[in-house]
Amino acid sequence: MPAFCYTILNEPAAGDWNMAVDEALLNESVANDLLAVRCYAWAQPTVSLGHFQAKEPLVIDARFEELHKVRRLSGGGAILHHHEVTYSCCVPVSHSLTRNPGDIYDLAHEVVMGVLREFGVASSMRGEKLDQESRFLCFSRGDPRDIVIGAHKIVGSAQRRRRGAVLQHGSILIRRSEHAPEFPGISDLTGMTIDEQRLAEMVAAGIAQKLGTPSPLTHLPPNVQQHARQLVQNYQE
């Protein structure tokens, strides 16, 4: 019998809360085998730094000086979260996919590409690695599993493992931000207007269906909310 999977859709929130919730869900996966998929958005333009990334470049990049900043649990380059839908999934060690966490990238990105096809958007995985690891921003880097439209990256994801459980979260870029206009989103590249709420619902439900037996769209479990309130101060830069 497939595992029960919480399918969570959240309103836009501050970056520190978004990251605290992701960690609270991961901790619940470690402690109680929670399987969960969540889609959310950002209440204001926010720069998230990869867990091991130095903060200094922000000081010299005037575009980001006044923006809210937060550090992610996951690695990789910095991300400007603005006009995007963000997904996250927490997979406990008891789930077979944690034996090869790369399979979680493939599963989630296949779902996202399938949802985009339903919107009439053709996309693909990049398929090759670009030698750009030194670049500060994630969307300036190239991983074989990135989702692209043409040469433009529209989805990038990162992971964190904790006692065998896996947190994966990823950014689905809908429109370019005035703070980083060099990165066009889906609407910019296709001329289409994307219903972000519907896309978030479809992505969350689609990933949950692949991981287990999905719940109807729901809110955070109360114990996860309480734990996130305890963690949020750790993410306040």
Image (spheres, helix red, strand yellow):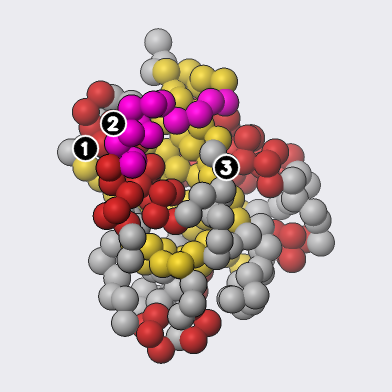
Q: Quadrant of the N terminus?
A: top left
The amino acid sitting under disc 2 is Glu
Element carrying mark 2: helix
User: Which residue carries the number 2 mark?
Assistant: 28
Q: Residue at image x 33%, y 34%?
A: 226
Pick whichever of labels 2 and 1 is earlier in the sequence: 2
User: Which residue carries the number 1 mark?
Assistant: 164
Residue 149: x and y in percent read 66, 61
User: Which residue carries the number 3 mark?
Assistant: 11
- Crowd rating for badge 3 (residues with CA inside 10 Å; few <14, some 14–19, many 20+): few
- Crowd rating for badge 1 (residues with CA inside 10 Å; few <14, some 14–19, many 20+): some
Q: Residue at image x 63%, y 35%?
A: 201
Element carrying mark 1: loop
Label 1 or label 3, whichever lies nearer to me, is 3
Element carrying mark 3: loop
The main secondary structure of the magenta stretch is helix
| Residue 48 visible somewhere in the drawing | yes
The amino acid sitting under disc 3 is Glu
For residue 111, which quarter of the picture?
top right
Residue 45: x and y in percent read 55, 65
Q: Which residues are magenta?
A: 217-229
